Image (cartoon, rainbow, N blue to C red):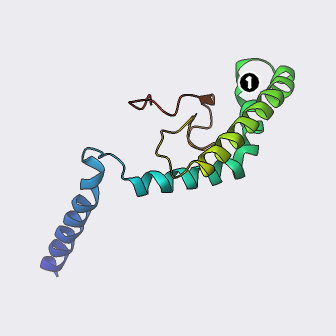
Amino acid sequence: MKYKTHGLACIMLIGFFTAATPALAEPDDESYGEIFGRKVLSGLANITTGVAEIPKNIIIVNNQSNFAYGLIGGSFKGILNMAGRMGVGVVDLISSPIPTYPIVYPNYVWDDFYAETTYGPAMVGEPTR
């Protein structure tokens, strides 16, 4: 019985290190297929979940100021960011065959819910983020 638990522990340890190795390795450049897939999926996700920008911005503006300004100003800011995120989603979906960097940061609404949504260049030599 003692040897079985040691063997099981060794197998689990080897499996853990094997699974963790790719995460510890240096990230390679994305292939064309990976960029295409990322752009299609992020485009669809940004079109679908762009509405979540409204409550996100209400929360952010409310945390920075008071409730009334957070509700009114956050709603307007959220509507603008919703339109921007949905527009970027459409652009990503249409231009998915063209390899570019992500335009919107965070890439998805849920990535960093308390971060301000920003937009940047897509056709730059090196990614800015």
Q: Position of residue 84 (x, y in %)?
A: 71, 35
In front of the other: 8 or 17: 17
Pointer 1 residue: 61
Identity of the residue furthest to the top in this view: 65
Secondary structure type for disc 1: helix
**In the image, what residue occupies the spot 74% across and 24% down?**
61
**In the image, what residue occupies the spot 22% across and 58% down?**
17
Q: Quadrant of residue 70?
A: top right
In front of the other: 5 or 33: 33
**In the image, what residue occupies the spot 76% across and 25% down?**
62
Number of numbered labels in the structure image: 1
Identity of the residue furthest to the left in this view: 3
The C terminus lies in quadrant = top left
Q: Position of residue 4 (x, y in %)?
A: 17, 79
Q: Is residue 56 left or right of residue 123?
A: right
Q: Is residue 96 left or right of residue 125?
A: right
Q: Quadrant of residue 73?
A: top right
The N terminus lies in quadrant = bottom left
Indicate whether 54 appears above or below 33.
Answer: above
Q: Is residue 115 left or right of residue 127?
A: right
In front of the other: 47 or 90: 90
Q: Residues within 10 Å of mark 1 (few under 14, many from 20)?
A: many
Q: Position of residue 35 (x, y in %)?
A: 45, 51
Q: Amino acid at mark 1?
A: Val
In front of the other: 17 or 105: 105
